Structure formats: C-alpha cells, structure tokens
Image (spheres, grey):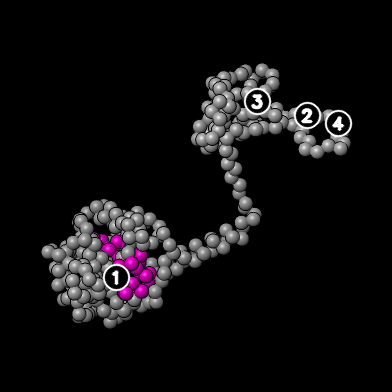
Amino acid sequence: MVDIPKNEVQRNVSSQTDSTESSDSESDSYGEEEPYKNIRDLSISEVNEENIDSSVEQLLRSIPSTSFGDVNINNSSNVVLGNIIKIKGDLIINTNHKECNNDHNKKKENERNEVIHKKQQVDLNKPESETVEHFITRSRWGAMDPAEDYTYTEEPMDVVIIAHTATNSSTETLANMVIVRDIQAFHIGEQDWSDIGYNFLIGCDGKIYEGRGWGVVGAHTYGYNKISICIAFIGCFLSKLPTPAALNACKTLLNMGIAEGHLTSNFKLMGHLQCINTQSPGRKLYKEIQTWEHFYLKEQTQT
C-alpha cells in the first residue's frame, strides 16, 4: 500500500490528522528518467486550493500502469491487481448525476422559464416614445434577483399609492442607481423581504426606476399590497417637493399604466399616509398629489 504524504496532497484536511504523518518536502523532485520505486518519488508541483484538482490528476497520471501476464487466482478474496493509493485526510468527490437528474433539471428549467415569461408579460412594455430613455430597468440599475418568485395580481389595478423612500435624493442618475440598490439591499437584508418593496421609483433626475414592475404584489403597505401598486419618490419630501421632472415622470407612468391596461381608467390615487401610520410621502408631496387627477380623498390614518 502506497501513501501520499499529507504535505504533497492536502485539501480540506481534518484537524484531527496526525501532524507527524509525513515530513517529506514538497520541493523534492526527481528526474524524469529516474526509475519509479515509490509514490514519494513522483514529481508534483506545489499544491494549493486553486490547483489541487489538477495536481492530483497530474500525480495519478504519472503513476506507471502495471502490466500483468497471465494471472490465475483460485480460492481468494479481496484481491487487488495494481496500485493502491491511500489519501491521508478528507477527500471530497464531486459527481455529476446528469442522466439521473435529467427529468428534474428539465422540470426546474421549465419552472424558471415560466416565471420569466410571466415577468415579461407584466413587465413595463417599452413604448416607442421618449419614455423609453427615461425608464431605468432593473438590469440597468444593477438589481439583485428576487430571493423568491413573484406573486402576481389581477390587472388592471384600481389603486395607486404614492410614497417616498425617506432617503437621500439626487438629480444624477448614477447616484440614484446607488440609492435604489441600497434600498433593495435594505429591504432584502434587513426587512427580510424577497425584493425591493416598491413597484416603481421616481428619481429627481426625471427617471422612472423599475422595482417589481406592473402586476406584481409588492411589500410596501400592509393590507394594500395585493390590491395596489406603489410608486415611491426617491428622497424625503416633508418640507420640499420633488423636481418638476420627477413629478412629470410620475404622471407619465400613470398615463402609461392606463394606456397599457395595467390600471383602470378611473383608478384611485392615494398617499401612503392615508393607508398606514406613516409620514410618507411627506407633507409637501402629499399636498401636491391632492391636486392630481384620480386623487381619492380617503380619511388619513392617524400618525
């Protein structure tokens, strides 16, 4: 039986392994023409986490195959012809059950494709207009994939909720992309939601940032998530208004929602604070949306 020294092939070795098993140096090398006498004589390059697989493969390939003549074995058991290699330490073997898992993989792929197809159906259709250049898709702002599959709503929706993110705001698109990514990370990491909570976000650069999109249940307003979409203005608007470009972008998005069948023609527009106990969308912005068409004068939730 031939041993591979621990310091020649070592990967994920258990802490209980006897440290005195081998003291051979990895730097020892032998000429190619030296006769093979022992596995310790085989040349092997320095092994580390990155080259362990190739190094082991190199080592095994370098072991000369044994040739046998006629072999006659009678009344024997546990007979081994050829080399026996003993690995000192933990050996992890990755196997690919391609054939066994073929049906399972096809099923999972079909499920993923179905989710993608549904997302494409309810995703914001890009009209042939100037709106396209003002629309920032999830891929453009660098969104993470949702932690769970979306739940979809029946369209057209009858309620739109206007909120603010209570974060910094910017008139620069790159800065807003960073803010939106931070919001998504907070919603997933701290709130334990599957994705950013809003359906859309509006930046003071006049851009529309895709959140969960049309026809998807959000995570923004308890009791309203399944019956509404939420549009959040990026920033805090207690004492100031969003830019005119941002306000116009929101109105454009609402008109688009009606035209594409995502919203009813007589949908109800409400402030976040009318639905739950919050200051969102801020006093200034809430006062502004009260002048908009479709505003629904529902009694405000007490703060």
Q: Earlier in the sequence, mark 4 or mark 3?
A: 3
Picture residue at 54% right of the left edge, 35% below the top: 16
C-alpha span from label 3 to label 2: 17 Å
Residue 133, image x, y percentages: 29, 60
> Is 173 one of the magenta-colored residues?
no
Q: Residue 287 occupies which quadrant of the picture?
A: bottom left
Q: Label for residue 39?
A: 3
Q: Label for residue 67?
A: 2
Residue 53, image x, y percentages: 56, 36
**Magenta part of the chain:** 199-226
Q: Secondary structure at mark 2?
A: loop
Residue 228 is left or right of residue 299, and the answer is right
C-alpha span from label 1 to label 4: 81 Å
**Amino acid type shown at disc 1:** Thr
Q: Secondary structure at mark 1?
A: loop
Picture residue at 28% right of the left edge, 74% below the top: 160
Q: Earlier in the sequence, mark 1 or mark 3?
A: 3
Residue assigned mark 4:
70
Q: Residue 255 occupies which quadrant of the picture?
A: bottom left
Residue assigned mark 1:
221
Q: Earlier in the sequence, mark 1 or mark 2?
A: 2
C-alpha span from label 4 to label 3: 26 Å
